[in-house]
Amino acid sequence: MNLAGIIDAAIGGFLAPLFGLTSVFALNALAFVLVLFAISAWKPKSEVLNPALESFFDSLAGAVRYMLYAPGVQIVVDRRITRDEHAQ
């Protein structure tokens, strides 16, 4: 449950004895309809995306190079290899 759900339940619990369940439910339904209207009226800004700067295979080769030469990755791979050698 997120914070909005907790606050909504608290406000509903506070308003229900004051105005009655029917009024609180009607208010909740009205708020729901307003949110639906706002979402349907919202038009996202369309942007022209730039084409990829490199091909898929160039990107894949870069990722493999990173995995081979990054010191942090080498430490993790070395630990994994060492652990596998001791397990056998």
Image (tube, rainbow, N blue to C red):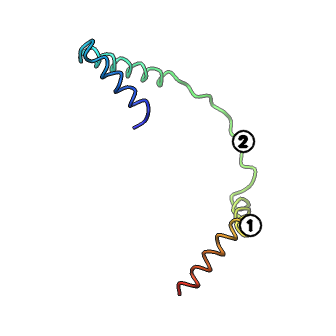
The amino acid pointed to by label 2 is Asn
Residue 53 image position (x, y, % from top left): 75, 50
Q: Residue 32, labelled with which disc?
A: none
* Cα gap from disc 1 to disc 2, whole angstroms: 32 Å
Q: Is 80 situated above or below 49? A: below
Compared with 61, 52 (above or below) is above
Q: Position of residue 86 (x, y in %)?
A: 57, 85
- Picture coordinates of residue 88, whole percent (x, y): 53, 87
First in sequence, mark 1 or 2: give its number. 2
Question: Crowding at label 2, few (<14), some or many (≥20) Cα neighbours within 10 Å?
Answer: few
What residue sits right under mark 1 in the picture?
71
Q: Which residue is mark 2?
A: 50
* Quadrant of res 16: top left
The amino acid sitting under disc 1 is Pro
Mark 1 or 2: in front is 1
Residue 6's quadrant in the figure?
top left
What secondary structure is marked by label 2? loop
Image side of residue 14 versus residue 34, left or right? left
